[in-house]
Image: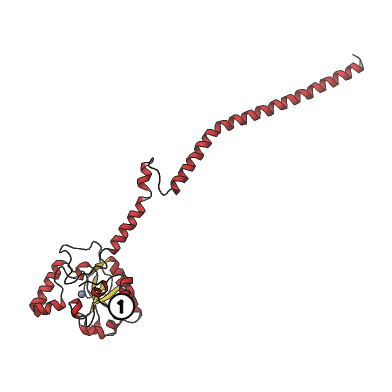
Amino acid sequence: MRIKNKKRFIISCASLAVLLVIIIVMLIIRVNTQTKEIQASEKSPKTLVAESQKTTTEAEATNAEPTTTDTTKVTETPVLPEVSQTTVSEALNDGITQVVNKNHSISSDLVPGDLVTVDLPSTRDTQLRGVAAIALKGLFNAASTAGIELYCCSGYRSYETQTGLYNWNVETYGVEGAELVSARPGMSEHQMGLAMDVTSASVGFDLLESFGSTPEGQFINENAHNYGFIVRYPQGKTDITGYAYEPWHLRYVGVDVATDIFNSGKTMEEYYGVN
Ligand SMILES: [Zn+2]
């Protein structure tokens, strides 16, 4: 082989080699691209499903009125909080502002379902409805802070207990006298679990009219409404309430109503316009 031919041969071989490399590189790139496209096309349906599911979940989570296609979720999500709030509200407010007196009675078998034994200084164990017991604790704590010592005397009384008490008063004071100081069975706020008679050492832990002029009675008169209680049978209102002055008998009606009644100077009957 001549030198000139040998050079051409080498150049040709080199060119061919470069061409081959280029072809191989292009093939590799093409195969890679195709592989990615295949992978992408395989993933695509799954991704779409996942995204679809995610979108559906978000829609369900934020949808206040879900469609009826998923009955399980319809019954689970939006209804329960509404029902429970209503139930709690009814449980807390049931009967709290109900007027019970000589003209408006309650059933003989009424026993409040949420009675608790009051955790306060008491002359005996006694009970109130939970909401009233919590409020009374607030009143007693405020009194204690002011150096006033109060005692519970009598809270919830069953229909039967009230019957015995009324009969004892009739035997002791006669019907007319008893009517002024004791409710007939079925007409007592004590059966509602919303009334508490309070007393103090200064009146010998008794229930006396003179309690009203003691520091304890005055504190009650001036502050009870801030905790949801009213002095239910005020002085000089016997012709309206039917009862003698009872500075010890507190009735729970809630802070708003108690404050309104206190500021109005009215009895509960006058406030609600009932006899
Ligand atoms: Zn009472």
* Rendering coords of residue 78 (x, y %): 38, 50
Mark 1 residue CB less than 8 A from any atom of ligand 1: no
Q: Which residue is mark 1?
A: 264
Task: Kindly identify the amino acid type of the residue bearing the numbered disc 1.
Answer: Ser
Q: Nearer the viewer, residue 77 or 156?
A: 77
Q: Nearer the viewer, residue 127 or 119?
A: 127
Q: Can residue 132 be seen?
A: yes
Residue at figure coordinates x 26%, y 85% from the top left: 214
Residue 208, quarter of the rendered image: bottom left
The number of discs equals 1
Which structural element holds mark 1? helix
* Rendering coords of residue 53 (x, y %): 47, 40
Residue at figure coordinates x 33%, y 55% from the top left: 84
Q: Can residue 139 be seen?
A: no
How crowded is the residue under tag 1: few (<14 C-alpha within 10 Å), some, or many (20+)?
few
Give the left or right position of residue 200, taking residue 176 as reference.
right
Residue 40, quarter of the rendered image: top right
Give the left or right position of residue 78, taking residue 230 as reference.
right
